[in-house]
Image: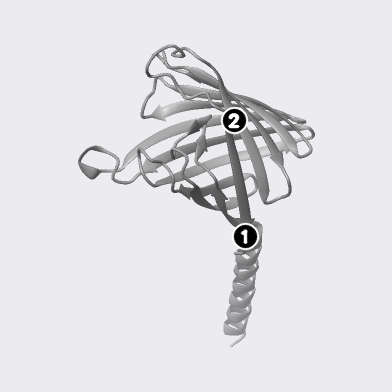
Amino acid sequence: MKKLTKAIALAGVMTAGMTAATSTFAEEVEVSASATVASMYLWRGLDLGNGAAAVSGDLTASIAGAYAGVWTSSGDTTSGNEYDLYIGYGGEVEDFSYDLSVWTYSYPGAGDEGNTFALTDAIVSLGYMGASFSYYYPLAGDESYSYMTLGYGMDAFSATVGMTSSDGDDDYTHLDLSYAYNDSLAFTLSKVVDQETEDSPTAIDDDVRLVVSYSLPISM
C-alpha cells in the first residue's frame, strides 16, 4: 500500500510538472494576425494590380525569436491571388537588429496546366538604429534575379531605395517615401527613379504612385 501511495504521489507530481511545462510553453508562444486594405498592390516599386485595390492578411506564431506564418493577398492582375509561407529567426542586440527568413510566394492556378506557381527567397535583414539593409536571394524560381533594399526611418517617416539585379537588361531602382499617420493608417509615395530599359517599348511606368493603406490587428 505504501508503494502504491508513493507511486500515485509521484505520478501526481509528474503530471503537475508536465502541465506546468505545457502551460509555460503555451504562454511563451505568441500568435498575432492582422488585415490590411491598400489602394493598390505595390511590390518592389511596381503596381501588380494595375491600379486595383488589394486586401491582405497575415497570421504569425513566434517564440524566442523564431517565427513562422502565412500571408495572403488579392490584387495581382497577372498571377491572381497569392499566399506566402515564411519561417525565420530574428533579434536585437542593443541598437543592432538582425533577421534571417525564407519566404515562398505561391500563386494557385498560375502555373502550367493550372498548377501552383511558386518562388522562394532567402532574406537577410540587418538594422542599426534607424538604418536598415535587406537582401533577397532566390532559392527557387528565377535564380538570376535578386533584390536589395536600403532604408532609413525616423519617427513616423521612412525612406527606402530598392534595387533589382538580373542577367537581363530590365533592372531598375525605385524610391519609396512613407508616412505612418498612426499604427493603422499609412501613406507611401513610390517612383522608379532609374531603369536600364527606359527608352525601350518594355520600359517600366515611372509615374509617381500614391498608396494609402489601413491595417488592423486581429485579436487571437
N-term-proximal mark, 2 vs 1:
1
- Mark 1: few/some/many CA within 10 Å (<14, 14-19, 20+): few
**Coordinates of residue 119 in the picture (x, y in percent):** 39, 34
Look at the numbered disc 1 and give the secondary structure of its residue: helix
Q: Which mark is residue 130?
A: none
Mark 2 → mark 1, Cα distance in angstroms = 42 Å
The relative height of residue 100 versus residue 3 in the rendered view (above or below) is above
**Coordinates of residue 167 in the picture (x, y in percent):** 40, 13
Q: Quadrant of the N terminus?
A: bottom right
Give the residue number, with chain letter if any, for mark 2.
190
Of residues 140 and 191, the one nearer the viewer is 191
Q: Amino acid at mark 1?
A: Phe
Indicate left or right for 10 with 182 as reference.
Answer: left
Residue drawn at point x = 58 percent, y = 26 percent: 191
Residue lying furthest left in this view?
113
Give the residue number, with chain letter if any, for mark 1.
25
**Coordinates of residue 88 in the picture (x, y in percent):** 55, 40
Residue drawn at point x = 47 percent, y = 12 percent: 196
The relative height of residue 180 versus residue 47 in the rendered view (above or below) is below
Residue drawn at point x = 65 percent, y = 68 percent: 20
